[in-house]
Amino acid sequence: MDSLIAKADAIQPVHKRRNNSKRNPAPRNGPSKHAPQTDSTLSSITHQTALPRSLRPSSPLPENAPTHNHVPNKKLRAELSRQSAQSIRRKQLIEDAAELLLVDDAGKMEVEGEMERTWRMTQEEICREAGAEAAKGRREWKLDGGPYRARYTRNGRHIAVMGRKGHVATFDWQTGTLHTELQLQETCRDIAFLHSHTHFAVAQQKHVFVYDQDGVELHKLKSHVEATRLEYLDYHWLLASISTAGHLQYLDATNGQIVAVHQTTRHKLGTPISMTKNPHNAVIHLGHQNGVVSLWTPNLPHPAVRLLAHLGPVQSVSVSIGSQGEGGRYMATAGKDGMVKVWDCRNWKGAVRSWRVRSAGDAEVEFSQRGMLAVASGGSVNVYTKPTLPAPNSPPPLYLTHPITHKPTTSIRFCPFQDILTVGHEKGLSSILVPGAGEPNFDSSEADPFENKRGRREREVKGLLDKIPADMIALDPDFVGSLGPSGTKEPDEGVPFARLPRLQRLKIQGKADETEVDADGGDGEGNDGDGDGAATSKASKEKMKMRGRNKALKRYLRKQRKNVIDPKAIAVRQKLEREREERRKEREKARLGPAAERKPSALDRFASNRR
Amino acid sequence: MRRGDPTPTSRNLDPSMHPFAKARERKRALNAAKMERMFAQPFVAAFEGHTDAVEVLAKQPESLTTIASASWDGEIILHDLGRREQIARFSGAHRGKISGLCFADEERLLSCGVDRTVKLWRVAEQGESTPEPISVFPGKTVFNSIDHHRTDPLFATASNTVQVWDETKSAPISDLTFPTSTETITSVRFNLSESSVLASIGTDRTFTLYDIRTGKAERRTVMRMRNNALSWSPTFPTSILLASEDHNLYTFDIRSLSTPTQIYKAHVAAVMSCDWSPTGLDFVSGGWDRTVRVWKEGVGRAPEVYHTKRMQRVLSTAFTQDARFVVSGSDDGNVRLWKAKAHEKLGIITARERAAIEYRDTLKDRWKHDQEVGKVHRSRHVPKPVYKAAELKRTMLDAERVKEERRRKHTRAGASVPKAERKKVVLAEQG
């Protein structure tokens, strides 16, 4: 029996195994430094497969760290060497991050002299300098039946164009393959690709129609009456449309069901006239007739955010697509009041930047993938770099400008993964080159410009499997997988103690950590007779602002007023009372003049009691 | 690029190039959890042949496929799980039911029954003729269980007493019974690592440890309810699993027999049998509630549950030697083969498929705390009677708890102290 027990100590369950790495340290990082690596196969793949140095679980001390051997003080020496190692590690981290995230800011035009300006470069000059393949992006499509609108697919390979009079065409612009060309013979207002170039929706005179690659009408969406703008939410498979009557409709493109209908005009917002989606969180941004911009999600019957952006109708809205961490963070609006404004979507207090464009009217704005902002207005297209740097009331640095002689310009679209900007106007479309506008590094699992038919089919199936439910659209897309609010519900009467959640059991035992609740819990009772709701909302935060007379003292008192009667608080309270009395007397004296020195009457006691 | 080459891919790890990464991953995890439930088809095969309840199963050591089963009609059948056929059949091996079965070594099989005999059989492909036993050991009382020593030619039997026999002698060589015991011993098992240590359970709710070198009972505990089966862990020598009449399974560390290391609660009727997987990380149990459950060591709830319409009370279970399958013998006379992992795909798996399976497993594990994913991942469909019984059991236990709480509330403070569930299991320790 004892031998069995003795044997048991040698072996332990896997999850209880002691970490004995400390006792017999294994040789770290494989082979020693002195033996040079001669395996050619290994060295050929290490570059691709090795984890960056900074991301390794324990990065060794950098090799080129300076030694501080000349410092006699041991403590100081250790501190110095730690600091230098830390700074070297930090640099490595930044380098690795830059390498992994491809943050290099290349591809833009740069000036050599101080007097040179990039915006002086004309399209002819740019085309001459650019390679032959890149110069193909510069095109002019002269078409009748304008003004024209255009839309690219997510991978930037295909383009759909639509003229106001009903001319619709989709084609692969790189190879020049025309997929379909339709003459719909009625007013068309907008066009949008669905999940891939094989399906597209057109907002026509009365209804929205869905066509396929060959121009065959697949669906007539009767529920969308007189739609003016269309947006397609790729990951949710939702087609959103706004109508002249002010309805915002979400249609599930997989089964044709209406997910949500919001009557936007009910909230005194005016008719929506412009629309865009936030690619970061799939919130729909609407620009309204009365200058309001509102943000909508399918699961909220009211706008998630509304802000008065302009003094006139909001002509155009765009949200930054932004690789490099700016995705969905900034919104640009252009209004009929001749202003263009850039907003921070995390903080709606005032525009980050606003400036006046030369001619009021139909200004259009559009962000590029690399964070440039194109503004088309008054016969020219201007492209700005760094439009999100906060500097109110001045236009951002102008990067490029191009005159468009055919007014009005109705749509501008950057081509994804290309340095191309397509401007739709009265006489057709013109594509111009904007060096450095597009993201050069595509991810083929998301949007692949070189996708073949098999890849497209694969993506469609995978996309359908990964379809996110419509009710998961929220302003903060990161709420998925985060902790929910802690349960503060009171326990039911009948539930036995052992069946209660852990937190409640702890609470009953008095062992729960309730410091958070207690910190502002005592404040509510001190309020002067507000409702319970107001008390709790006020309890949420003690502001440190100094507003009004003697606020700090009052705050001090409020903190003291916790069912505890101590002489200090009483003394302070009496002092306050005395001061108030004196102030009142002085006021009275000032009001009544010296005549105020009246004789005390018997009725005074009631006055003081009332106070 | 040549024709047939895989499509070249490029990656951009910038998070803003991958919008809704988390939401999509969650959806994928949900799909993975649903797919697991869709592919969960644990039943592999049924082996017929017995005409009465199969009470005992025995694994052939060092064989992945051979398993022996014995039933109440006194018949022993050797099954080949791989080829799904019978290797040998010993009809009329005993008169009355066979209550114990174990392999002596690769070629020989020991059986005992209610006809007061232990018989030793040679295992071989046989012809038409009914085989004769190599030797017969007559006993004085009805035998309930038998287990062979791992290396020596010894075996232990359980009846009114625990006896150790030598294969070459026709009478027991020693009697290990606990001095004051008057009970019937229902099962004996040798420890797999320290092969002289023997454990037994008895009808008097006891669990006893013996050492055949000292030749006496070392320790005994009396538990709240009697145990129906026991099994030593193959990897942790001091760990033992007991299947109890009170619907639970218990693992004990024999170094401290006062409390179980874990209580396993899910059965809604008495647990009739249990067996460890050879890895010692899982074990299987079969119950009077007509279900087979596969547990993870140390996880006391939500086991995998197997059931079929025609399976009756599960009297015997065994894990196969490759830890991939589970065998159950039930009251309806069938031996059934199940997968240990319900959703595991049998057969050849390509590298891509393997990668997909591993990815799905990781996703499920990562998102199991999500409400929706976890619900799909956890919930199991059980037959209506089992479901109802579980519901009833829960209600009764809750009511008991409430009552106890109220009673405590109305007694003097400190007069009745709540007792942990683990402390309630063992009533007394002796020896």
Image (cartoon, grey):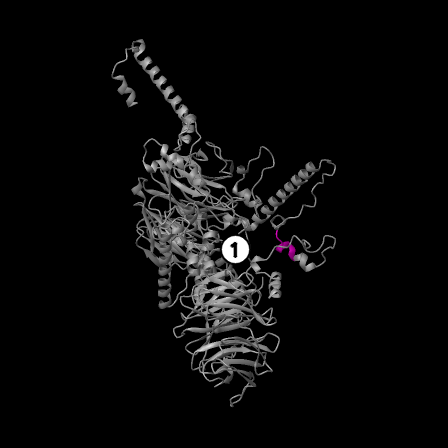
Residue indicated by mark 1: A444
Tell me the quadrant of the picture where the C terminus of chain A can be found.
top left
Nearer to the camera, A230 or B314: B314
Specify whether B394 is left or right of A90.
left
The residue most toward the left is A603
Label 1 sits on what residue type? Ser
Vertical order, A230 against B160 (above or below): above
Q: Position of residue B137 (x, y in %)?
A: 54, 83
Q: Nearer the viewer, residue A64 or B115?
A: B115
Q: Is residue A606 above or below residue A253?
A: above
The percent coordinates of residue A386 (x first, y second) are 51, 38
Residue B133 occupies which quadrant of the picture? bottom right
Tell me if residue A57 is in the magenta stretch: no
Q: Residue at x 50, y 41 (%)?
A: A372
Q: Crowding near pointer 1: few (<14 within 10 Å), some, many (20+)?
A: some
- Please provide the residue range marked out in magenta: A45-51
Q: Secondary structure at mark 1?
A: loop
Magenta region, mostly helix, strand or loop?
helix
Closer to the camera, A442 or A217?
A442
Q: Residue furthest bottom?
A: B129
- Front in this rendered view, residue A543 or B93: B93
| Position above or below: B293 against A251 | below
Q: Residue B62, located in which quarter of the rendered image?
A: bottom right
Question: Residue A47 magenta-drawn?
Answer: yes
